[in-house]
Image: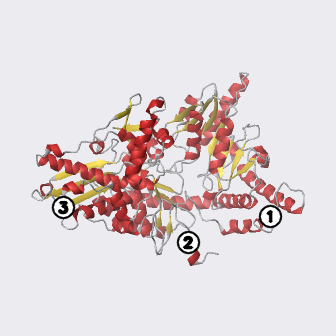
Amino acid sequence: MSSPSQKKEVKQPADVMNQYTGERWYYSDIVKEHFFNPQNLMLEDPDEAQFNGIGMVGSPACGDMMKIWLKIDSGTERVENLKWRTFGCASAIAATSMFSVMVTENGGLPIADALKVKPQDIMKRLGGLPNRKIHCSVLADKAFRKAANDYFHRSGQHERVIVEGARVIDPTLNITDHDIEEAVLEGATDLDAVQKKLKVGIGSPDLIPEIEQLIRFYKEKYYG
Amino acid sequence: MKEIYLDHAAATPMDPRVKAAMEPFWDARYGNPAALYRQGRLAKAAVDEARETVAKIFGSRPSEIIFTAGGTEADNIAILGTARLHPGKHLITTAFEHHAGLRSFEALERDGWEVTFLPIGEDGIVDPKAVEKAIRPHTVLVSVMYANNEIGTIQPIAEIGAIVKRVRNERAQGGGVLPISFHCDASQAAGFLPLSTAALGVDLMSVNGGKIYGPKGSGCLYVRSGTRLQPIFQGGGQEQNLRSGTENVPLIVGFAKALEIAEAEREAESARLTELRDYLIQRLTTEIPKTVLNGHPTTRLPSNINVSVLDIEGEAVILYLDAKGIAISTGSACTSTTLDPSHVILAIGRPYEYAHSSLRFTLGRSTAKEDLDYLMDVFPEIVEKLRAISPIKMEVGQTEVSHPEAFAGQGSKIKVGGRTYK
């Protein structure tokens, strides 16, 4: 009943993008490669004098943590070196490894361009991640931003520091746009699902249009 | 490549004897047990026989056994079925039940029932005195699992059963009419612990066939005679009207056979696995630094080892071990569909990093000492590799989140098990 050729036609679950040729795995082959052979890891005791930007972030979605050490060439402003460590899962490891390659390859991206690398760009290079793993690739991005801000402070370019302030959307429950962003990252991509997590706007129906707009925005940002 | 399966609490391979017992009921004996003609009678006889087999093991009457499609369904029938007879009344359970129970109680709480989720001791064991204290005049249900599915700790079911029974008798003597029932999810316990319903003092007890080398999607609910439930399925009234739908004859036969074998082999297998369990706990906690056992060291299932290997994340460990042919599971948020870390590890008072780092090894009939030795040959290197890339350095015994600054300034927080870390 199940000859090998028939087996191959069995459809993968939608959130497992695996272009396998032989054995199936939970992640794509590229993810697998970066998971088993992560690039640009900080393996030795960091000599912090070798770096001019350091940032550590945690994922509020799952509790993973990520630390990035950056060396920016002060003349060209290119990313000369990026090292990282993580307390995170396979997709966090693979996404950060890929990100580190993307910003350091071909002589390194100028920091301004590196800051424009979106989680989708990382995922595209990885051959996709399951939907609920997208927040793991966001972690690399966030840690990089924090490290870049550290560099801007250290190099006296305070005006370039990117401040991501939270805006209160639901004043009764004190829920911000960041909370909604996190909910979308955790896989809640419509009003019902977001309200299930956050109760946002349940007592204030007049807020619903803005909440829906934000959900669409973040959905587009991360899944679009 | 070697294949070493150490996730028997998740699923067990079906015993060939079970498969053989089920065989005729797929095609040769296909009748509906409700039918009067020969094929129907043959099917009914098989279901009756299975019911008697299970009843004998429980020391109960056959009419007290309701066949279900697994443990989750049995839990739902028991918990929702009891609560719905008594709208708005009080229910008691524990904070570390299997989701089949926990989510049922959470749903009831949303719908207006009062629910007490009892805290768990650091050793992963419920204090019967806490149960006693929580019982109110209008409490109608107490539900405590026999053995925890993640950390394997064994609960004092008989003591709790006696307390509930005493309350019931006191109510009756006082002229009260409000019943109180005791439900126990024995899905993980079956095959390791005695299932005599009288000794345990349970009114309702769930068992799952998929955990005892029987077919997945099979199981039963014991309903002590006189215990009333509102049916949650509507239909043809099968299984005392508590589980309508044509009886799944092959799975029922398979379930009974699996339980029969598990019970026959229970004592010998438990003794064998206890030795292997203690061997692995010993090796893990002495050979791998900063490895902490979760749950009581001996009041736990013979099959269960749950440790937190600090500073490393569970999903990454699982996939590295998988590459070596070893299958285990983790309480890390990264592997759960909701991205919540294990509620069990949090319930025993560990910080979320412990849950993130928790690994569950569950042994079974195929497990030999050589398998554990092979695990210990390859595991330390994986730990070393993942620790080398980890930015955190937890201390054993730490109860605080290690790097709150990593989460600061993001306008958000880590939510775990109802606790919020800013």
Residue position for label 3: A81
Q: Between B232 and A8, which is closer to the camera in this rendering?
A: A8
| As drawn, B176 above or below B269 | above
Mark 3: give few (<14), some (14-19) or many (20+) Cα within 10 Å. many
Chain of the residue on which disc 1 is drawn: B
Q: Which mark is residue A9?
A: 2
- Mark 2–mark 1 distance (CA, rounded to whole Å): 32 Å
Chain of the residue displaying label 2: A
Q: Are marks 3 and 1 on the same chain?
A: no
Farthest left residue in view: A75
Whether residue B317 is visible: yes
Q: In the drawing, what numbered circle is on residue B92?
A: none
Kindly report which numbered mark, 2 or 1, lies closer to the viewer in this rendering: 2
Q: Quadrant of residue B22?
A: bottom right
Residue bearing the label numbered 1: B30
Which kind of residue does numbered mark 2 sit on?
Answer: Glu
Q: Considering only vertical position in the picture, is B346 above or below B266?
A: above
x and y, in percent, of residue A82 in the image: 21, 60
The amino acid beneath tag 1 is: Tyr
Quarter location, residue A159: top left
Badge 1: how crowded within 10 Å, few (<14), some, or many (20+)? some
